């Protein structure tokens, strides 16, 4: 599954998603356009809940909203019974605007500002995942001033390097995130945390990275964190009631990708924690997971219009579309690879390799280096699948490009859940000198 679950080719030979003709969507809402299939998102949420709860009724699935957040998305997450993880005040504010229940929100961040912590405390969110000594001190002081005692977890760096791009590895020793195990800092921090009067330690958190296919990295990380849980218990008497193993399950960006399934992932996580708890003779903590990409990634596609075609004889053909690094930074950030198709020629055979370039003033603004497509013409609607996660969220206004609209499609209905920015939006924060 690279395309959304409901994708098919309709009678007109066009790509259809959620019962909507994507070529019609491009006409109606203009391009670039993010199209997200509601059914795929809901199916992934259900697959997560059922896979984990089948093995252990007491698990929680927390959607990592950094992958894609909007008011409508929060509504779906709530309806599907998942909890929500936010990693900034902005994400928390969107959750608040969506009336997402505060008692179902977790907050992350390696440098939460006092304003962000203030909002979290005011809203009374379920749990703050503390990332540093400075944050512990600050949070304890703020909680004391407010007369509250927030629940917290500590983010631990397990010293694991999963096989994924360097920029999305987070669990290795040399990481800006969390308290290191190897240097003994994590143990010292747990001891100190238990002395803070205004913080209630609930458990430990790890997140080893993102777009991970091989599950053995998770098994190893669980072994390490459960060894640590036992060490903490022996040395302090503190018994972690919860273990949060983060997110990171990989998805299919290309047909040849073979990520593990949610069921296989659940099996490794739940059985791993249970086995380790039994091995150490400690109570099995409640298991929390935080998937982002694997909930929304394959639900989304981006539609573009082809504007110019430049043929360099014997070298390559550049097909330029009306977006690029302003709506999909991942190829430029970490060489992420995508597939492409022509939405209005969905049943045409590919004939030659071309390079898909963006419209920005950067030579590196290339979405796909060599992609085999049917004969491309100006005006064709190009579609890149698997852009539902970390696409719109990393969108920017480089070259003062207005950010695209985001459309949810379901059963033939298209709903604009984020409108397209216009030029007025681009200047609305500006003030002249006088
Ligand atoms: C703490 C934490 N949890 C969960 C996630 C979600 O990861 P993914 O989208 O790969 O599932 C991230 C992603 O960076 C993260 O930093």
Image (cartoon, rainbow, N blue to C red):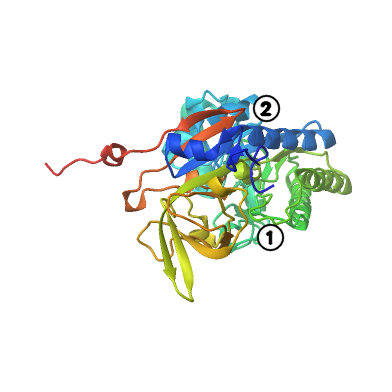
Residue that label 1 marks: 162
Relative depth, front residue between 127 and 372 = 372
Please provide percent x and percent y for residue 91: 49, 36
Q: CA distance from mark 1 to mark 2?
A: 30 Å
Q: Is residue 136 visible?
A: yes
Is 116 placed above or below 329 here?
above
Q: Is mark 2 within 8 Å of ligand 1?
A: no
Residue at image point 78% right, 31% down: 58
Characterize the local packing of mark 1: few (<14), some (14-19) or many (20 or more) Cα atoms within 10 angstroms.
many
Quarter of the picture holding the C terminus: top left
Residue that label 2 marks: 81
Residue at image point 59% right, 55% down: 339
Characterize the local packing of mark 2: few (<14), some (14-19) or many (20 or more) Cα atoms within 10 angstroms.
some
Is 92 placed above or below 206 here?
above
Q: Helix, strand or loop at disc 2?
A: loop
Q: Is mark 1 within 8 Å of ligand 1?
A: no
Check the image and name the residue furthest to the bottom: 314
Q: Is residue 196 visible?
A: no
Q: Helix, strand or loop at disc 1?
A: loop
Relative depth, front residue between 352 and 355 = 352
């Amino acid at each position: 599954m690279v395309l959304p679950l409901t994708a098919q080719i309709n009678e007109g030979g066009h790509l259809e998603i959620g019962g909507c003709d994507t070529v019609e969507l491009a006409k109606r809402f203009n391009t670039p356009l993010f199209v997200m299939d509601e059914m795929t998102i809901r199916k992934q949420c259900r697959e997560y809940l059922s896979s984990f709860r089948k093995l252990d009724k007491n698990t929680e699935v927390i959607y990592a909203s950094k992958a894609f957040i909007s008011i409508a998305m929060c509504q779906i997450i709530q309806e599907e019974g998942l909890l929500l993880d936010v990693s900034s005040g902005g994400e928390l504010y969107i959750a608040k605007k969506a009336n997402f229940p505060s008692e179902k929100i977790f907050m992350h961040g390696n440098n939460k500002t006092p304003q962000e912590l203030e909002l979290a405390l005011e809203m009374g969110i379920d749990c703050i995942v503390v990332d540093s000594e400075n944050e512990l001190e600050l949070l304890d002081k703020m909680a004391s001033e407010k007369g509250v005692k927030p629940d917290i977890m500590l983010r631990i760096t397990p010293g694991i390097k999963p096989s994924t791009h360097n920029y999305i590895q987070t669990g290795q020793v040399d990481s800006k995130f969390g308290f290191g195990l190897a240097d003994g800092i994590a143990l010292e921090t747990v001891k100190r945390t238990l002395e803070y009067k205004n913080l209630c330690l609930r458990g430990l958190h790890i997140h080893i990275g993102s777009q991970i296919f091989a599950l053995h990295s998770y098994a190893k990380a669980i072994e390490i964190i459960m060894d640590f849980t036992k060490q903490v218990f022996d040395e302090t008497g503190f018994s972690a009631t919860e273990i949060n193993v983060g997110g990171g399950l990989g998805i299919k960006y290309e047909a040849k990708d073979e990520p593990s399934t949610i069921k296989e992932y659940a099996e490794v996580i739940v059985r791993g924690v249970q086995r380790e708890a039994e091995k150490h003779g400690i109570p099995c903590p409640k298991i929390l997971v935080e998937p982002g990409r694997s909930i929304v990634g394959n639900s989304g596609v981006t539609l573009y219009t082809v504007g110019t075609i430049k043929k360099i004889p014997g070298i390559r053909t550049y097909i330029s579309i009306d977006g690029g690094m302003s709506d999909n930074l991942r190829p430029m950030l970490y060489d992420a690879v995508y597939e492409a198709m022509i939405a209005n020629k969905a049943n045409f055979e590919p004939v030659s390799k071309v390079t898909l370039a963006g419209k920005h003033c950067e030579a590196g603004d290339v979405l796909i280096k060599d992609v085999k497509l049917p004969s491309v013409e100006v005006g064709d609607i190009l579609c890149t699948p698997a852009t539902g996660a970390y696409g719109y969220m990393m969108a920017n206004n480089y070259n003062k490009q207005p950010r695209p609209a985001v459309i949810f499609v379901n059963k033939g209905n298209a709903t604009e859940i984020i409108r397209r920015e216009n030029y007025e939006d681009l200047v609305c924060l500006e003030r002249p000198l006088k």
